[in-house]
Amino acid sequence: MHLPRAALEDWMRDFYFDTSIDLGSSGVQCWSLAELRRLLGITVEELDVISLDDTPSYGSTALRQAVADRFAAGDTNRVMTTHGSTEGIFAVMNALLSAGDEVVVVDPAYHSLTSVAEAIGCRLVRWRLRPESGFTPDLDDLRALVTSGTRMIVVNFPHNPTGAHLTREQLNDLLTLVDGHDLHLVWDGAFAELVHHGEQLPDPATLHDRCIGLGTMSKAYGLPGTRVGWCLAAPEILARLVPLRDALTICLSPVTEFLAARALVGADRILADRRAQAARNLRRLGAWAEENADLVSWTSPSGGVTAFPAFRGVIDTEDLCRVLGSRYDVLLVPGAGFGHPDRVRLGFGGAEDAFGEGLARLHKALVERRGALAL
């Protein structure tokens, strides 16, 4: 298996740790351990009794129950915890796909949702979300792509990086499509609990036995450093993931499983703060884009904490993003990694003061660029 380099991760390696203002990430502001302990009432004594041992292959009982209670109607038999959602993506695709299989994948997409299937030798068919329609998902377009040879549909809603989302009617149409074909649906629900317009949708894995749902502590929960994710699926599908788990990570850390379980039990407290902060930042971004309509073109996202704007007159944003990183101390992600070099992924989940300063620096860079081109 040959996995292509991930342009997004290469960019983050170059700029994520070396810039002080983050306008490029796709999650909410991260919590410190001290903040998490205060918010959830975790004591030092509780941490001290954790045995630094292996955990069960499917995940600890407490964490699987917490995931099940929040996302799977309490059914732990449909839950496996994973080392982030990336392990889930890798394991599911390697367990269910073979070389030559046809896979329909939403486009643009997070790199793992395409690269793993490509490395297996699958034939990718792209369900394009079109910029001219504000990246609104069109289920008629999807239906036209699915054939008798399609073995998997891969989607991510709310969508990274555009923030597009499905309606409940569209989800029902998607499940009908799955029901009528011999295929699996992989549903990346990393942003499921970050919906601004419309409704939070149930995970399709709880509605159909050929659907697999993926989740993570990274995006809505602000806990990417736990490296905890989960896979929701019928028990027979989860059983097929175990040999891959044995070859990849064996198990998760009992420390991070403990923290993730407590965070999920206290999820409403964690989410309330970060959702409110993201909503304020989104309003600020909307006002900024309106004030700078001569520079910026965008569609307000329905979910997640990323937008996918274009800048007028900028055909390829990589140089702009590089200047922002090296001269303005700002992380912004060029859209080339998502197949749209004229756009950027702009994250609005971070601290409000830093977000406002980041927009001011972005505006300055855009104005300076326009002035330089006019000379």
Image: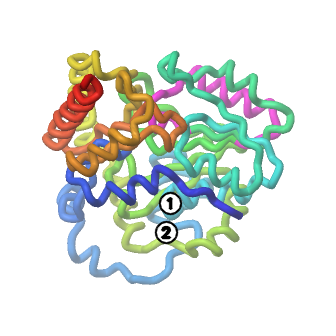
Q: How is the image coloured?
A: rainbow
SS type, badge 2? loop
- Magenta stretch? 156-184
Question: Callout 2 environment at 10 Å: few (<14), some (14 to 19), or many (20+)?
Answer: many
Quarter holding residue 254:
bottom left
Query: On the rendered image, what quadrant is the N terminus found in?
Result: bottom right
Relative to residue 282, is residue 83 depicted above or below? Answer: below
Q: Is residue 344 left or right of residue 249?
A: left
Q: CA distance from mark 2 to mark 1?
A: 6 Å
Where residue 108 appears, as percent x and y from the top left, is: 55, 36
Q: Is residue 285 left or right of residue 199?
A: left
Where residue 127 appears, as percent x and y from the top left, is: 65, 30
Q: Is residue 358 visible?
A: yes
- The residue that appears at 55% across and 40% down in the rendered structure is 109
Q: What is the residue that sits farthest to the right in this orientation?
A: 148
SS type, badge 1? helix
- The residue that appears at 62% across and 69% down in the rendered structure is 245
Relative to residue 237, is residue 126 depicted above or below? Answer: above
- The residue that appears at 76% across and 53% down in the rendered structure is 121
**Depth check, front residue: 116 or 87:** 116
Q: Which residue is mark 2?
A: 60
Where residue 189 appears, as percent x and y from the top left, is: 51, 42
- Residue 64 is tagged as 1
Question: Callout 1 environment at 10 Å: few (<14), some (14 to 19), or many (20+)?
Answer: many
- The number of numbered badges drawn on the structure is 2
Q: Amino acid at mark 1?
A: Arg
Q: Are marks 2 and 1 in contact (CB under 8 Å)?
A: yes
Q: Amino acid at mark 2?
A: Ser
Q: Is residue 208 visible?
A: no
Where residue 188 appears, as percent x and y from the top left, is: 55, 44
Relative to residue 286, is residue 36 depicted above or below? Answer: below
